[in-house]
Image (cartoon, rainbow, N blue to C red):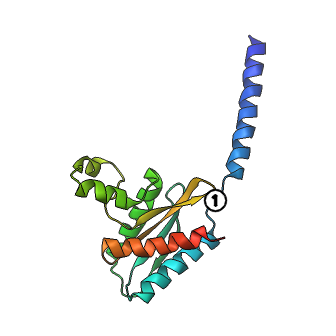
């Protein structure tokens, strides 16, 4: 019995070490990357004279960077963050939920955390979702255009 317990403890320890090594090799969203993403998104918004909030979250949906452009409505802060969080949680753009609802699949509206409004897009690094960007402040299509500019900047080395 003691031998079985010792083997189990050793095996568990090996798995924990292997798991932590795998976790360390996964790409992470850095503050520098989040700032670069927000800069590119803001440049797109400024180019079009759109005032928005830009939220960048990590792979757990936690805020890494938030930018509220001048004269953007305060309510867009929460919306941008929720769009980004939704894109991370479901590993897909929030536009997918908007399209589903538009096609009559209203069951999407019952999914906790699913935001059926364009403007949230996952950030993929090393074939993994490492975070997301969410944009709010103009039309949902314009929010999506701005978010896409941020994603494009993230994809560049």
Q: Is residue 62 above or below residue 77?
A: above
Whether residue 1 sits left or right of residue 77 in the image: it is right
Residue 45 in the image, given as x and y percentages of width and height: 43, 83
Which residue is painted at 24% across and 49% down in the image?
105
Q: Nearer the viewer, residue 79 or 109?
A: 109
Quarter of the figure with residue 2: top right
Residue 19 in the image, given as x and y percentages of width and height: 69, 40
Which residue is painted at 73% across and 39% down in the image?
18
Q: Nearer the viewer, residue 144 or 131?
A: 144
Whether residue 80 sits left or right of residue 14 in the image: it is left
Residue 109 in the image, given as x and y percentages of width and height: 26, 52
Q: Is residue 18 above or below residue 116?
A: above
Q: Is residue 70 above or below residue 109?
A: below
* Residue labelled with disc 1: 28
Whether residue 100 can be seen here: yes
Quarter of the figure with residue 8: top right
For this orientation, the residue located farthest to the left is: 104
Residue 79 in the image, given as x and y percentages of width and height: 36, 67
The quarter of the image holding the C terminus is bottom right
The quarter of the image holding the N terminus is top right
């Amino acid at each position: 019995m003691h031998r079985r317990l010792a083997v189990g403890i050793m095996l568990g320890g090996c798995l924990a070490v292997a798991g932590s090594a795998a976790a360390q090799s996964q790409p992470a969203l850095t503050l520098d990357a989040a700032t670069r993403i927000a800069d590119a998104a803001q440049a797109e918004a400024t180019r079009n004279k759109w005032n928005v909030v830009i939220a960048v979250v990590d792979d757990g949906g936690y805020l890494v960077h938030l930018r509220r452009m001048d004269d953007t409505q305060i309510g867009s802060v929460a919306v941008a963050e929720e769009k980004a969080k939704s894109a991370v949680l479901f590993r897909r753009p929030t536009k997918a939920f908007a399209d589903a609802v538009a096609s009559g699949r209203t069951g999407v509206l019952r999914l906790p955390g699913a935001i059926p409004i364009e403007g949230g897009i996952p950030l993929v690094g090393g074939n993994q979702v490492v975070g997301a960007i969410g944009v709010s402040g103009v039309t949902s299509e314009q929010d999506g255009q701005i978010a896409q500019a941020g994603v494009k900047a993230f994809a560049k080395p």
